[in-house]
Amino acid sequence: MGSQKTPDMSRVPEHVPADLVRTIGLTMGPEFLAAPHAFMADLHRTQPPIFFNPAEAEQAKDAWMLTKYEDCYYVLRHPEIFSTRGATPFPRDPDNPFKFIPLEIDPPYHRRYRNILAPIFSPQGVGALEGYIRDLANTLIDEFVDKGECEFTTDFGRPLPVSVFLDLMGLPQEMRDEFVSWAVGLLHSQDRSVAEQSMMSIVTYLQQVIREKSENPDDKVISTIIQAKPDGQPMTGQEIFGFVLFLFIGGLDTVFATLNNVFLWLAQNPERRREIIDSPDNISNIVEELLRANAVTFSGRTVEQDCELRGVKMKKDDKVTCILPAANFDADIFDNPLEVNFHRPRKPILSFAGGVHSCMGAHLARLEMKVCITEFLRRIPDFQVKQGARIEYWPGGVIGPKSLPLTW
Ligand code: HEM
């Protein structure tokens, strides 16, 4: 591949065979950024199913890379071998370390934490939000429908999941612009000081909110976490903070990026928009297939005990990255995987990972996708990418276009 660089062998542990070492520029390289999903689908042709990537890139840092569905599925379902210890790439203050909860807790304790929010994130729990999400989508569309154009990412893709998140958490909607700017600063700034400043603002704000809600609880997510006793005891301040912060990190950018990818595809496929509008009864399959073809993130794990996968020997403390978008394009599981087929036989997609840590927000994310696609196409059935606009992607661990100017 053009972007394959000479690997830095000083980063490669001794037990890794030299012929499995590949530096491919995942999440950062020019070929990835030109067309990320095509690049990841192509990994099945261009790379071995398991290879070692010695690189600085956050999601791919000095880790085994897995592209096959079957291998990712296995890793995600064996937390006793592949732990989430140290699985997230976010730097933390070594003097004041905290865990991202529930992701960084392994079984058996994991379930106690996850159960705290299970009713809120169940299909029934999130179903109660449908009317709210529909109204919100329409209020955002009202702002631009008569203009004949919008910048989808800032006018719709970003504010919608942030408003839903604020509602779930029990935070004031007036914080929306602030949250948008923190999320952009933390997750997308190329300038480290901006990312640090955003993190500080989030930390200060969340700590203040946690204090306030400890005194005046409501029935929303933050208060539910504060009042929970997973071990028979209330959680420590640090645990509460790690839980709330992870929801912010895990729940905002993922929906944003998925919406942006899906609406780019819709803008480029007029006859498929018509198909969606004409088949309201098939909307769940449509959403599932669009999520399969537009997976936005990865699952990182740390090897807990020496093991072997597909004949490749892995050692304790090795890092493993499941390239979930590539797994969704595995032709052994999904026939003709690059085709977007709304009548595909149902098989579990890996966009939300799988196993004990499968995404807790998956029902909510599916609902947000369903409502946004339905309402946008109802109000604006015909649209295209603005002439002359160049689509560029964010580098990093959540894949999506930076901006998406649409006209109609
Ligand atoms: C389309 C949108 C979303 C995508 C693609 C997505 C993707 C994922 C993935 C891949 C994981 C597993 C991570 C791993 O295995 O290392 C995960 C976990 C998680 N996600 Fe999501 N997510 C989305 C939306 C949300 C939302 C809206 C929320 C909540 C507000 C959320 C909360 C969580 C939580 C709490 C976990 C950890 C679950 C556990 O460890 O038990 N996600 N998500």
Image: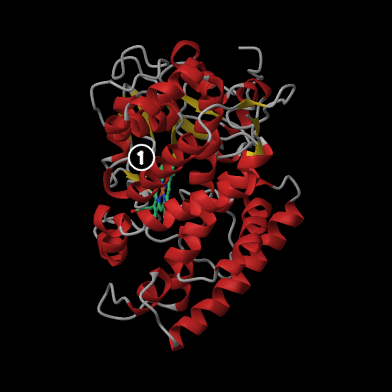
User: Which of the two residues, 321 or 385, is positioned nearer the viewer here?
Assistant: 385
Residue 235, image x, y percentages = 37, 76
Confirm or reject: label 1 Cβ below 8 Å from ligand 1.
Answer: yes
Of 294 and 158, which appears nearest the observer?
Answer: 158
What residue is drawn where x is 31% and y is 76%? Answer: 228
Residue 322 x/y as whole percent: 42, 34
Left or right of residue 219: residue 264: right
Say above or below: 155 vs 48. Answer: below
Check the picture and name the quadrant holding the N terminus.
Answer: top right
Apparent side of residue 136 relative to residue 54 in the rendered image (left or right): left
- Picture quadrant of residue 150: top right
Q: Is residue 211 above or below residue 130?
A: below
- Residue drawn at 28 percent across, 21 percent down: 343
Q: Which one is in front, 198 or 308?
A: 198
Badge 1 crowding class, 10 Å Cα cut-off, few under 14, some 14 to 19, many 20 or more, is many
Give the side of residue 244 with respect to residue 91, left or right. Answer: left
Classify 248 as above or below 18.
Answer: below
Q: Residue 67 appears at what percent x and percent y?
A: 41, 24
Report whether residue 101 is seen.
Answer: yes
Q: Position of residue 101 (x, y in %)?
A: 40, 61
What residue appears at the point 57 percent right and 50 percent down from the top-left corner?
140
- Residue named by callout 1: 353
Q: Quick check: can you spot residue 349?
A: no
Query: What is the three-letter code of the residue carrying label 1?
Result: Ala
